[in-house]
Amino acid sequence: MTRPRGLSARITLTLSYVGLVLVAGALILTVVWLFLLRYVPDEPLFTDTGFAPSQRDLLRAFAGPAGAAMVALLIIGAVGGWFLAGRMLAPLDALTEATRRADAGDLSTRVRMAGRQDEFRELADSFDGMLQRIESQVEEQRRFAANASHELRTPLAITRTLLDVARADPDRNVDDLLGRLAAVNERGVDLVEALLLLARVDRGGFPQASVDLSLLAEDAVETLLPLAEARGVELVVHGGEATTFGSSSLLGQVVLNLLQNALIHGDATGPVTVTTHRDDGGAVLIVENGGDRLDPALVSTIAEPFQRGTARIRRSDHERNGLGLAIVTAIVGAHGGELALAARSVGGLRATVRLPAHGS
């Protein structure tokens, strides 16, 4: 938006100080006139004690010094107001400069205003916090876009390879080719749907209602029971009531993703347990699986997009992308909760979701 150039804030404040001094001086002169000079006689008086000046005499004697004093006050007001306005507006200048740098793309810039807490420092601290959050989100989006591009390139490259091979070998089994292309395409579609789900969660605005995590856990167990049987893993459910407020479909995706992750990355040496309960005003969901002992440093990264538990893990038909825990983190955060991942001392992983309890 283009706006006409106006007076700077510093000049405006300086003129305001000068105007205030002018008004104050005029008020003092008015008070002198109303309560002193108006009662002096118009003509000089000669008494036994001496000469008493008239009103005209006093005005001639008073006007010059009063005018000079007013001019001096206006000069002092202008000079003092200019420097005082500059000092008061210095924090805004720093904020403006930081805003320009941020607008130019330097999101790492910070004001870091020194001094005691006041309105300007509070504004500067809020501005720094906003830039920090924006920088973090932009960096996360860049990393996510790069990873997503890499992941989407894989099924496309596989599809091209299959087509090139089929073109070079006219006798290739068409049904086998179509089956492989369908599997690759399905994985690509699943990845795109996961990306769209993440975008939906980030936008917010989803319908919310009372949701019992124990019922969602039972549905997820029933859905993934064939996978558990195929992998020889026992599913154990401890379903205490845990009611929260949110989207039933999105929170159902949370339970499904955590349980699927536990089945994929766990092993048959121990069961996968799903526990729900209400604790300290929160609705809690815990999913645990057995397996190898995990490095805590690794555990802190596996919730990031396209990260997987260990290098030896390969994708299966049930794990089509690396967005499972990233989706869980986004959905739980959108519901005002938190996801905590911890390596179990006996091996495997414990995922704990804590959401605000409905009515708390």
Image: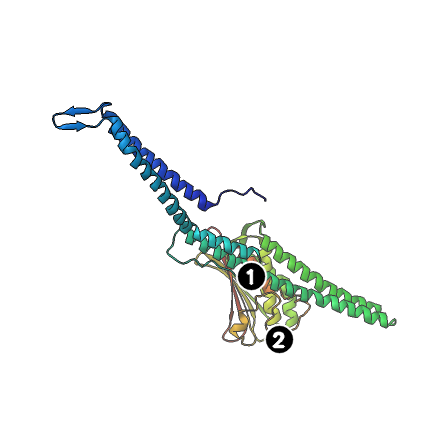
Regarding mark 2 in the picture, which secondary structure is present there? loop
Residue nearer the viewer, 221 or 342 = 342
Residue nearer the viewer, 230 or 279 = 279
Residue nearer the viewer, 195 or 30 = 30
Residue 40: x and y in percent read: 23, 26
Relative to 168, 251 lies left or right: left
The way the protein has been coloured in the rendering is: rainbow
Relative to 50, 267 lies left or right: right
* Residue 200 is at least partly visible in this image: yes
Identify which amino acid the numbered label 2 is placed on. Answer: Ala
Q: 10 Å neighbourhood of mark 2: few (<14), some, or many (≥20)? A: few
Q: Please, is residue 200 above or below residue 74 in the view?
A: below
The image quadrant where one finds the N terminus is top right
Residue 290: x and y in percent read: 55, 73
Relative to 153, 133 lies left or right: left
Relative to 113, 202 lies left or right: right
The residue under label 2 is: 311
Identify which amino acid the numbered label 1 is placed on. Answer: Thr
Residue 28: x and y in percent read: 30, 34
Task: Report the residue at 18% width, 27% height from top.
Answer: 52
The residue under label 1 is: 329
* Residue 213 is at least partly visible in this image: no
Of pointers 1 and 2, the one earlier in the residue sequence: 2
Task: Report the residue at 60% width, 67% height from top.
Answer: 261
Residue 76: x and y in percent read: 35, 44
